Image: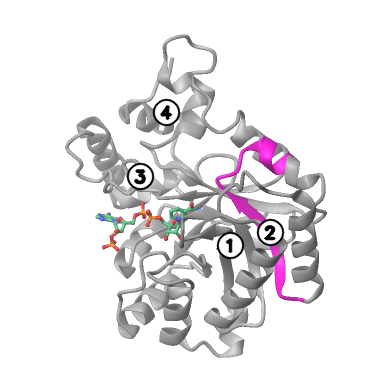
Amino acid sequence: MMRLVPLGPTDQQVPNVVAGMMRIEEMTDEAIRDLYEGCRAAGVDFFDHADLYGSSRHGCERRFSEALRLSSAERDEITLQTKTGIVADDWHFDHSYEHIVTSAEESLQALGTDRLDVLLLHRPDALVEPDEVARAFDHLESSGKVRAFGVSNHTPRQIDLLKTAVTQPIVANQVQLSITHSTIVAQGLAANMAGEDDSITRDGGGLVDYSRINRITLQAWSPFQKNFFDGVIFGAPEYPELNELLDRLAAKYDVTPTAIATAWITRHPAHMQVVLGTTNPQRVADAAAGSDIPLTRAEWYGLISAAGHKVP
Ligand SMILES: NC(=O)c1ccc[n+]([C@@H]2O[C@H](COP(=O)([O-])OP(=O)(O)OC[C@H]3O[C@@H](n4cnc5c(N)ncnc54)[C@H](OP(=O)(O)O)[C@@H]3O)[C@@H](O)[C@H]2O)c1
């Protein structure tokens, strides 16, 4: 069964397994429809996009709407999230008023919808002016074009800086997290230990705790990748112990290792969302089966330990 979690401090309940649309550009219309139907059948009604995804700006957003041609009634049944702030030409980041507003309006058009349910700032912009972000969010909110706002790959301090001007709640922070690439969790376990790589703070410090304190929903991107787009953990020869444990727990709970890797994230009390990247409807169903598996503490710690992280 799909477990629902609150979206930030809002009243909206959203599934804790969601579908990332970064890899759909080359799929046929029929394959995109099959993926969408597979998601809906599994209770995944939350779709994650970005203006960046695809070989041209808004490419994947456009493929999604062209292939699905959702009626407005069906549009109302789903949550559409997209992102702004990365410019692929001369790769750089841009949180200026003009860029945020223009890109959000282009996303509306590409997705064939009249509002974005959630808009995230994709990566921190070192040149950010919080007042400009606030002005862009106010405009997009008051014109009804965007319902809720969030960030991605932001540190607690970067969020605090935005909040000096932004008045809307930051509902989500989408960050990289898998059992192997689990720095945001591992650093808390190895806190203050000398000579341990895991004790190094890589997220500005206390991102997970900050998110719980401030009711910001963490969304885990690349939930099955070993590290950065270098292949999935399943069957990876570098992780024999981890795969052995995934297989053993899969047998115990009568699910696939994909469900166990999903459950390792959903079991965390921060009520995180897992952002799947698969283009395969069966794998969506496999992952969705991990939405509400009550891994024991020993199992949860066993997985992060088997992935090579320090449980001191
Ligand atoms: N905010 C950010 O900065 C950021 C960065 C990257 C990604 N994202 C978001 O996060 C989403 C997920 O990222 P991701 O695509 O890297 O996640 P992922 O689910 O960890 O990886 C997906 C890739 O792994 C393959 N795969 C998945 N399960 C598999 C399995 N059991 N066995 C073999 N191969 C498997 C998929 O192939 P198949 O399609 O064949 O299953 C696909 O190529 C993206 O769609 C995007 O929405 C956000």
Q: Residue under circle 2?
A: 96
Q: Amino acid at mark 4?
A: Tyr
Q: Which mark is residue 131?
A: none
Q: Amino acid at mark 1?
A: Thr
Residue name at image x 43 percent, y 46 percent? 263
Q: How many marks?
A: 4
Front-lying residue, 286 or 61? 61
Residue 298 image point, x, y percent: 42, 27
Looking at marks 1 and 3 on the same chain, the residue that comes earlier in the sequence is marked by 1
Give how far apart the Cα atoms at labels 2 and 3 are.
28 Å
Looking at marks 4 and 3 on the same chain, the residue that comes earlier in the sequence is marked by 3
Assess whether residue 223 is covered by the magenta stretch. Answer: no
Looking at marks 4 and 1 on the same chain, the residue that comes earlier in the sequence is marked by 1
Q: Which residues are magenta?
A: 144-160
Q: Amino acid at mark 2?
A: Ser
Residue name at image x 65 percent, y 46 percent? 127
Q: Residue under circle 4?
A: 301
Residue projecting furthest to the left: 237
Give how far apart the Cα atoms at labels 4 and 3 are.
23 Å
Looking at marks 2 and 3 on the same chain, the residue that comes earlier in the sequence is marked by 2
At mark 4, the secondary structure is: helix
At mark 2, the secondary structure is: loop
Q: Residue under circle 1?
A: 84
For the residues carrying marks 2 and 3, which lies nearer the camera in this image? 2
Residue 1 in sight: no
Residue 165 in sight: yes
